[in-house]
Image (cartoon, helix red, strand yellow):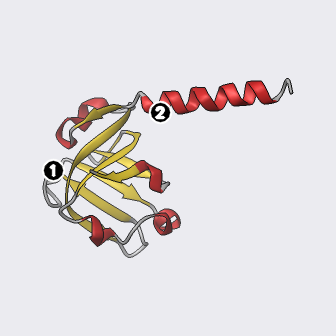
Amino acid sequence: MKIVKPVLILVILLCAASSFAQTISPDSAKYHEGSLATVCGKVYGTHTGKTGVVTLNFGAEYPDNSFTAVVFADDASNFKKPEEYNGKQVCVTGRIKMYKGKAEVILKEASQLREQ
């Protein structure tokens, strides 16, 4: 019984921490590098590369997009087909990092992406 309580407390704290992610626009994501955040906006296009990496472009169509949500091939089965997100308002949650001068979040689980 003593082991269960610390584990339960840890789970509660982790869930609470994820609910504190700030919500920001795709255009402002670049100012939040390293932050855990929820980025909400319209998906202007998707792309699946030769290696199976899926990108969802926010803010504008590629290459003028301001933010990208990235799904690596190994995790793609956790999500709907990329084209089903085109033109939709979605929110993605994760740690923001910069890649080639643009902000991105890497998605691993379906729970990181929700339609508005």
**Viewer-side residue, 115 vs 70:** 115
CB of mark 1 within 8 Å of CB of mark 2?
no
Is 3 positioned to the left or the right of 90 in the image?
A: right
Q: Residues within 10 Å of mark 2 (few under 14, many from 20)?
A: some
The earlier-in-sequence mark between 1 and 2 is 2
Q: Which residue is mark 1?
A: 59
From the top left corner, tell me how far across and down residue 23 is, in percent.
Answer: 29, 34
Is 73 positioned to the left or the right of 49 in the image?
A: right
Q: Amino acid at mark 1?
A: Gly
Query: Residue 64's quadrant in the figure?
Result: bottom left
Query: Residue 81's quadrant in the figure?
Result: bottom left
Q: Callout 1: helix, strand or loop?
A: loop
**Viewer-side residue, 35 vs 5:** 5
Residue at screen point 33% across, 39% down: 38
Against 47, residue 66 (above or below) is above
Q: Which residue is mark 2?
A: 18
Against 63, residue 40 (above or below) is above
Residue at screen point 76% across, 25% down: 5
From the top left corner, tell me how far across and down residue 69 is, in percent.
Answer: 33, 53
CA–CA distance in space, label 1 to label 2: 24 Å
Examine the rendering and report whether any part of residue 10 can be seen: yes
**Viewer-side residue, 59 vs 2:** 2
Examine the rendering and report whether any part of residue 102 can be seen: no
From the top left corner, tell me how far across and down residue 111 is, in percent.
Answer: 46, 51
Q: Amino acid at mark 2?
A: Ser
Residue at screen point 79% across, 30% down: 4
From the top left corner, tell me how far across and down residue 31 is, in percent.
Answer: 25, 30
Against 104, residue 15 (above or below) is above
Q: Identify the residue at the far bottom of this view.
A: 50
